[in-house]
Image (tube, rainbow, N blue to C red):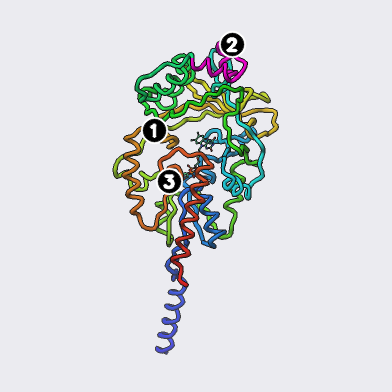
Amino acid sequence: DRTQTAMATEIDRVLRAKRTFRPAPERERYDTLIVGAGFAGAVLAERLASDSGQRVLVVDRRPHIGGNAYDEHDAAGVLIHRYGPHIFHTNSPDVFDYLSRFTEWRPYEHRVLASVDDKLVPMPINRTTLNELYGLSLENDAEAAAFLASRAESVEDIRTSEDVVVAAVGRDLYETFFRGYTRKQWGLDPSELDRAVTARVPTRTSTDDRYFTDTFQAMPANGYTRMFEAMLDHPGITLDLGVEYRDVIDRIDVDHIVFTGPIDEYFDFRFGKLPYRSLQFRHETHDVAQFQPVAVVNYPDETVPQTRITEYKHLTGQLHAKTSISYEFPSAEGDPYYPIPRPENQALFKRYEALADAEEGVTFVGRLATYRYYNMDQVVGQALATYRRMAAKMTTESPT
Ligand code: FAD
């Protein structure tokens, strides 16, 4: 009897232990953790998964992919860019071919007008701008060049952005187009900005009014977000959105990290914050088919708070009875958008870069990790080059 009771007790203990036993949660294993699902992160995820057969985890603190290039349909059903207008342009066939694997394109040449004294004139300044602004009838490049030369002022020692522009086009055009715009955009007067910021004043003597002159100018036919979905649609890629990378890092095992967030944040702002200029957007929908004649109208006048208004249907080609626009207001507070171009900021970045170079197992890539204003195509080019270096390293390190 005793033996039977003992056996029953033992069986009961084992069964109970079995019921309550939970295996310690196994840490998920990935080859690479990618922080950021913008262009830099998405290109590296796609390459590592489909070209190197890696298991990749992509995290982003935002609840969506695409980074700053994210687009979405608003409440009215109009496709808008949440973080301001993104126009794709590049001279690189490699970058264009690569992205063409994930999207069809809609040909689009960007045009910008500036609102000056109730007139809308082409930006950058071209012959039409000069004729409309000054009531002239300059007929060819030579006449326009002569006019600009007659306005240009000789500046002894060109040190600041103001000097560059005044020396190229004179004080009147400087004040009409550059002074107020720069003061709004950067919160700094052009006389406080290094000459390198405006190294080249884009003026034209022709009537070419295209904003960009690159070989490839087009918009992803179904938007950026669809293109990112196609890039990240791979069995080797896992997405975790709306999470901070620090909250993920403790529950996974990874061999390598690709970090596309702010470099100063990665190092806990050890040397202080890298200064950024931010933007606030005000999105509106209007009950008209068209709000303005082109996608972007600039407001160089300092007494007007916005720097520009964008109407998205020009970019996307969408047909819709209503139209959605966004106002842009530069601000000191908010998401990091534009690195503030001052030599002391570059020097601070260099100190972080030295830490990054010494950080084992982490690759820093993208605009925030390299503290540089990069266009989308430049980030794609940078990410593809980074992948090639990583792949070469993997080949030499892998056992034969
Ligand atoms: P991002 O797109 O910023 O992606 C980085 C991602 O990392 C973000 O989504 C962020 O949430 C995430 N992240 C950061 N830290 C963490 C963390 N700790 N944990 C988790 N996630 C994190 N380029 C053009 O070519 N044409 C244009 O017309 C153009 N217009 C622009 C207009 C504006 C207003 C701005 C600001 C930029 C514009 N650009 C344009 C530049 C373009 O936005 C960038 O080139 C591109 O977004 C860079 O991609 P990225 O992957 O480096 O960075």
Read off the residue under disc 3: 261
The answer to which of 209 and 27 lies nearer the viewer is 209
In the rendered image, which residue does mark 2 sit on? 136
Location of residue 354 with respect to 32 vertically, above or below: above
Dot 3: what SS? loop
In magenta, the rendered stretch is 127-149
Lateral position of residue 39 relative to residue 167, left or right? right
**Alpha carbons under labels 2 and 1: distance apart:** 36 Å
- Residue identified by numbered label 1: 341
Q: Residues within 10 Å of mark 2 (few under 14, many from 20)?
A: some
Report if the CB atoms under discs 3 and 1 are less than 8 Å apart.
Answer: no
| Disc 3: residue Cβ within 8 A of ligand 1's nearest atom | yes
Q: Is residue 37 left or right of residue 271?
A: right
Q: Residue at x 70, y 32 (%)?
A: 319
Rendering coords of residue 150 (x, y %): 48, 13
Residue 260 appears in view: yes
Residues under numbered marks 2 and 1 in contact, where contact means CB atoms less than 8 Å apart: no
Q: Quadrant of the N terminus?
A: bottom left
Hey, what amino acid is under mark 2?
Leu
* Residue 302 seen in the current view: no
Q: Earlier in the sequence, mark 2 or mark 3?
A: 2
**At numbered mark 1, what does the secondary structure look like: helix, strand or loop?**
loop
Q: Earlier in the sequence, mark 3 or mark 1?
A: 3
Say above or below: 166 vs 71. Answer: above
| Residue 259: image location, x then y, percent | 43, 50
Work out how far the residue at label 2 is from the one at label 3, CA to CA, in angstroms.
Answer: 50 Å
Magenta stretch encompasses residue 133: yes
As drawn, the label of residue 396 is: none
